[in-house]
Amino acid sequence: MAETGRRVTPHGPVLAGTRILVTAQRRATDLASALVRRGAQVHIAATLGVEAHIDEDTLVRRTQELIADPPDVVVVTTGIGFRSWLETAESVDLLEPLLEVLAAARIVARGPKARGAIQASGLVADWVAESETSREMAEYLVAEGVDGMRIAVQHHGAGDDGLESAVTAAGASTVPLVVYRWGPPPDPEAVERSVRDAACGGFDAIVFTSAPGASAWLSVVRDLGERAALLELAREGRLVLAAVGPVTAEPLVVAGFEPLVPDRGRLGALVRSVVLHFGGDDLGVDVATGRLRLHATAATLDHAVLPLPPAGLAVLRLLASDPGAVFTRDQVLSVLPRATDDHHAADVAVGRLREALGDRSLVKTVVKRGYRLEPLHREDIA
């Protein structure tokens, strides 16, 4: 077996060279920081804004009603909504009586984030919808029996999604609590730029943390007529759409994409799934000096970013599309940013590519035919 093989230890962070779009507003900084720490270049274009404390007077009045006439069941759909509700109650000296009411009620939570917020307040969730869907909560409550019960429903940012109507039809009365709503994006032009940039192959991955956010981004995609281009990039493996969980992924699936979804609906799990994807052995080409990976705007060798100008990256992308195959000078010229029919320009671009790779033998000249990238065959990997 040959002594030269693919390096086992990466020379740089796994996401080095990748360009990732974050579409969230809530916790966007946390998500972006986690990706940046692993080497990614991150851009944020929030597809939705959060309008906190919508009609605070109504929220306070309904809180007072619940204290005066306690509910049998309290439905908590989001951690941020539940925390904001308690903060609002605290600001008007209603926190202690509200917590007493909540402690006496049966609390149903939509997913682990809602449960975490409940626990942080010193309460305990009696049941948690692990699928993180309101539909599962509605089915559970109706199956348990809610006829004659009074149910308080803290809505998530998209408003009522059928849960209230389901339990009302089963005989319950409800008290809706709207703590925040999804609003328009803080920078609509940034969202449009992100869609156009993605459709041109400018991102390696786009990450989504909520179904409404994914739907809002896809709405801009449809308005700009870029769905076909994005689907083609995803089919070619040049663009990854990643969602924090199956609920967030659903709008993407309906639109024809196959998003990357972690096993657990957490931001940390989402980051790990992205890292595993771009660090996996099924991406890239083994060459004599390491593993070569092509990204949207950069190339890496064992996760070390190569100093490639746009022309060199375009040529390398062409050669790496079929390692070992010979590409003519005309084919090389066809991918250069500046159109020309001068074969010398192809020779210059290849020469600069060789310098950037650090090993001129990686790109072979085939006399009177053209150039090819020299792959390291699997049987040669030590």
Image (spheres, rainbow, N blue to C red):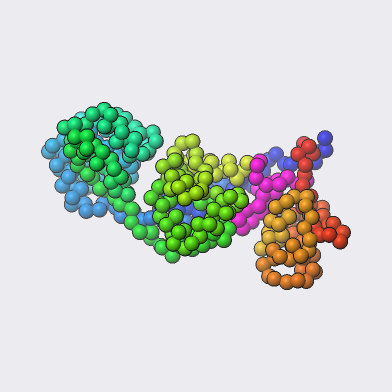
Residue 73: in magenta span? no
Q: Residue at x 56, y 51 (%)?
A: 234
Rendered location of residue 378, percent (x, y): 76, 39
Front residue of 89/132: it is 132
Quadrant for the N terminus, please: top right
Q: Residue at x 22, y 37 (%)?
A: 169
Front residue of 227/179: it is 227
Q: Quadrant of residue 87?
A: top left
Side (left or right) of 18 relative to 302: left
Residue 289: in magenta span? yes
State whether residue 214 is above or below residue 69.
below
Rendered location of residue 306, percent (x, y): 68, 55
The residue at the far right in this view is: 367
Q: Residue at x 34, y 35 (%)?
A: 136
Rendered location of residue 90, percent (x, y): 22, 44
Side (left or right) of 281 relative to 92: right
Chain part drawn in magenta? 281-309
Q: Residue at x 73, y 66 (%)?
A: 333
